[in-house]
Amino acid sequence: MTSVANRKPLPLKIALWTFVVIWLMMAAFPFLWTLWGSFKVELDFFSIADWTNALTGENTERTHGSPFTGAGYEGAWVQKGFLRNVLNTAVICVFVVCTSLTIGTLGGYALSRSGYKYVFWLLIIALMFRALPQITLVSGYLPAFFQYNVWGFLPTAIIVLVAINQPFTLWMLHSFFESIPKELDESAKVDGCTQFQAFRRVIIPVMWPGVITTGLFSFLLAYNDFAVTSMILNEDNRTMVPQIAAFLGTTQTEGNVMFAVASVVSATAPLFVLVLFFQRQIVSGLTAGAVKG
């Protein structure tokens, strides 16, 4: 009886699957089209005379002897040294995530277990700070960075990104800690643990889905950031997103636009792999913080 009751009518199934297929096509089309175009030359992918050149690769075949070419990737990675920008991004992401999670877990746990009324106002102030546009925060940092000659370096960008990201991390982890019963801490203390030992041995293992979810959002903030890194880092220390913008800003040089297209594909592909790899932890982390135990 249950299986019959839960069985959906055939027209509803068709409508649902049609909607899913159309939605997936619309969501995936921008990336697939960019991926396809990254193996063309600029005259084909951005053809004004005939848009079908982006499909057939007429000018690409005339230039390289094949409808597809890796000239965009070779130009970005070999000629322009995009690998350096990738490494800069990796360094910033690792330090931003590790620092944000360390401060966020300790601060979120302390606030969730505190009985003082100022906790609410601290969180509100943190939320107000996070709501400010990043460009206004960076403009306030710049005079000091110029004065102390620390502008242009990766550690400077890491400090600013951690400061911008920390209120969000604190809010998320605080909500996750609030969902964990305080009885776990008390039971650990009865068994002889100190407060920090209870945090490290009992609470953190339960909190892993929330930590992974928060860490992923912190990673995306640092990975996709443009405003902070473009204003604080010099040309030698650029991350991927400002470098892509630099490619697009030199459209008068033939081929640089295709360097940007190839770089966009190179920067986007790891995000798909990351989300697919951590999808279970992301879902369980997002739902774990929604129910208070």
Image (cartoon, grey):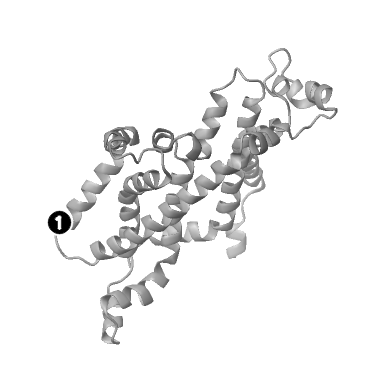
Q: Quadrant of residue 46?
A: top right
Which residue is denoted by mark 1 in the rendering?
118
Q: In this view, does 157 lie above or below 95?
A: above
Q: In this view, does 203 lie above or below 4?
A: below
Among all residues in the image, which is located at the extreme top?
49
Q: Where is residue 40 in the image (x, y as percent from the top left)?
A: 73, 28
Q: Is mark 1 on a helix, strand or loop?
A: helix
Q: Who's the residue at 60% across and 43% down the image?
A: 83
Quarter of the figure that contains the N terminus: bottom right
Q: Where is residue 231 in the image (x, y as percent from the top left)?
A: 39, 33
Q: Looking at this view, is 293 or 149 the one in front?
A: 149
Q: In which quarter of the image is residue 197?
A: bottom left
Q: In which quarter of the image is residue 190?
A: bottom left
Q: Who's the residue at 58% across and 57% down the image?
A: 277
Quarter of the figure that contains the C terminus: bottom left
Q: Is residue 143 above or below residue 183?
A: above
Q: Looking at this view, is 152 or 112 the one in front?
A: 152
Q: Looking at this view, is 166 or 152 the one in front?
A: 152
Left or right: where does residue 130 sit relative to residue 270?
left
Q: Where is residue 43 in the image (x, y as percent from the top left)?
A: 71, 19
Q: Who's the residue at 68% across and 14% down the image?
A: 48
Q: Who's the residue at 54% across and 58% down the image?
A: 278
